[in-house]
Amino acid sequence: MQSLQKSIQSVIDSGRIGSPVFLRSMLQLPVKDISIEHATNILITLANLWMPSSPESIQARRSPDSIQLTTMIRYLGGQTAVLSVNRVATDQTVSIDLQLIGNKGAIYHETPSSRHHNQEFIIDLTETTDQSQLVQQSMDSGQWVKWEEV
């Protein structure tokens, strides 16, 4: 199965959805897996790969119990990404619910969907950028943080 990054990128490259303008992604992560901060960093990297302009600012909020972390990114071209990582019970599998809206169409992706429930969920990033300082600064300040401030 092709990785999520490559699958979405191939649809963008085909022009089927036009230019991406809005991304909403919700990642459900079993407690035993990677930290929600690392998972958020992966989603930020994906969003930045798919959006046609550079990020301008970021805002992040974490629940008091550290079960959920939501990040919103504004891009220089007016695009927006809303990314949420949520902890789920250890007996559940990793899943993602993603919607990427372009100016000509949209991509809806849910993994695992019922007919693919036994397939492994794959995010294959050749290069991940570390935005943890930006996320932390926004959580600490409760404010939007300019991308170049950290």
Image (tube, rainbow, N blue to C red):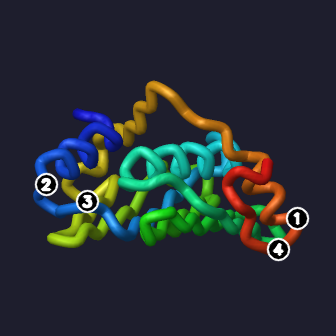
Give above or below for 13 relative to 88.
Answer: above
Secondary structure under tag 2 reads: loop
Q: Which mark is residue 15?
A: 2
- The answer to whether the residue labelled 1 contacts the one labelled 4, judged by CB atoms less than 8 Å apart, is yes
What's the CA distance linking mark 3 and mark 2?
28 Å
Secondary structure under tag 3 reads: helix
Give above or below for 8 relative to 17.
Answer: above
**Residue in the foreground of this view, choosing between 94 and 126:** 126
Crowding near the residue tagged with mark 4, few <14, some 14–19, many ≥20 C-alpha atoms within 10 Å: few
Q: Looking at numbered disc 1 in the image, what kind of residue is underneath it?
A: Asp
Q: Upstream in the sequence, badge 4 or badge 3?
A: 3
Q: Looking at numbered disc 2 in the image, what kind of residue is underneath it?
A: Gly
Q: Position of residue 37 (x, y in %)?
A: 70, 49
Q: Looking at numbered disc 3 in the image, what kind of residue is underneath it?
A: Ser
Q: Residue most toward the top?
A: 126
Q: Position of residue 49 (x, y in %)?
A: 42, 45
**Mark 3, mark 1: which one is toward the viewer?**
1
What's the CA distance linking mark 4 and mark 2?
37 Å
Residue identifier under label 3: 114
Q: Upstream in the sequence, badge 3 or badge 2?
A: 2
**Mark 1, mark 2: which one is toward the viewer?**
2
